[in-house]
Image (cartoon, grey):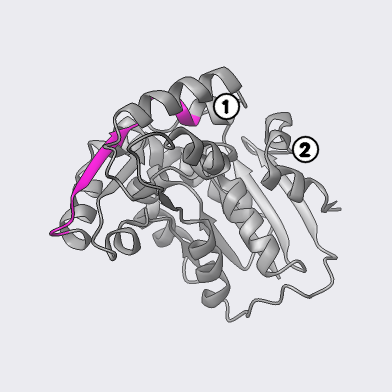
Amino acid sequence: MKIALMDSGIGLLPAAAAVRRLRPDADLVLSSDPDGMPWGPRTPQDVTAHALDAARAAAQHRPDALIVACNTASVHALPALRAELEPTLPVIGTVPAVKPAAAGGVPVAIWATPATTGSPYQRALIRDFAQGVAVTAVPCPGLADAVQHADEDGIDRALAAAAALTPPDVRTVVLGCTHYELVAERIRAALRGPGRAPVVLHGSAGAVAAQALRRIGARPAPSAEPSSALTVILSGHVRELPQAALAYAEGRLLKAMSPAR
């Protein structure tokens, strides 16, 4: 079994690590676009072109499923990706976890890139799944880029700015960019303080990993022998994991896999 994941950068690591935990025997193909990132400021047509390039590079390795581990690509490119690749290759998109976050009825904040924060897509999610719930949209300029480059000072500054925009009564935070899951504990820490309620974070990595397995009829088997291989594709070329990926536990987990031959 082989699962491919694509993103502009290392935001695919959380979902890849989730697949790894569910099926240690699965081979993984990670296709990202460091030469073309960030995708957020690009036009929808440009995002689609870059996403198709990353998906095609992954598809050459004949995976059983492709996870689009990127909110921006899922918003703009998912129809084009499915039109080209399905039904031969199932394509699983990433949707911010607004629905489960709002189910508790407590105040919610959605942390996302500025482009996603102002998008009709996010407004539609709030309208469809969070009616009657207090929702605060929190743009996080610079956070994904700082996470991508493991820029500690940049991460701290972006987290402090986003925390300042998050009302103190917020109990649930939706991580609307896959990069943010790599710094989940630091987000929790940034939201601690006098007068603040403890927060629950809702990411998407676990859900999309499980959905990918369902789409190909595979069951989680975490006790399986982890004899799997890793292929890393950077802007169309097979390479090693970027050094910045090893700053995160998810990257180190994947680094321990055997390189594909």
In-image side of 198 versus 249 (left or right): left
Q: Is residue 149 left or right of residue 81?
A: right
Q: Quadrant of residue 252?
A: top right
User: Dot 1, crowdedness within 10 Å: few (<14), some or many (≥20)?
Assistant: few
The residue depicted at 70 percent of the width and 44 percent of the height is 249
Compare residues 159 and 228 and report the one nearer the observer: 159
- Residue 199 is situated, as x and y percent measured from the top left of the image, at 40, 49
Circle 2: element type: loop
The quarter in which the N terminus is drawn is bottom right
Left or right, 25 with respect to 104, comes to: right
Residue 2 or 195: which is nearer the viewer? 195
Residue 138 within the magenta-colored segment of the rendering: yes
Q: Mark 2 against mark 1, which lies toward the viewer?
A: 2
Q: Mark 1 highlights which residue? A: 35
Q: What's under tag 2, amino acid-wise?
A: Glu
Residue ID at (77%, 38%): 240
Q: Residue 89, image x and y in percent?
A: 54, 66
- Residue 87 seen from this side: yes
Q: Residue 18: image x %, image y %?
A: 62, 59
Q: Amino acid at mark 1?
A: Asp
Give the label on residue 9, or none. none
Given the current orientation, which residue lies at the most extreme front position?
Answer: 194
Q: Residue at x 57, y 76 (%)?
A: 216
Quick one: label 2 or label 1, which is nearer the N terminus? 1
Indicate the secondary structure of the residue bearing disc 1: loop
Compared with 251, 99 (above or below) is below
Q: Which residue is mark 2?
A: 240
Q: Could you tell me residue 232's position as x and y percent?
A: 71, 44
Q: Which residues are magenta?
A: 131-144
* Mark 2 surroundings: few (<14), some (14-19) or many (≥20) residues within 10 A: few
* Quarter-of-image position of residue 176: top left
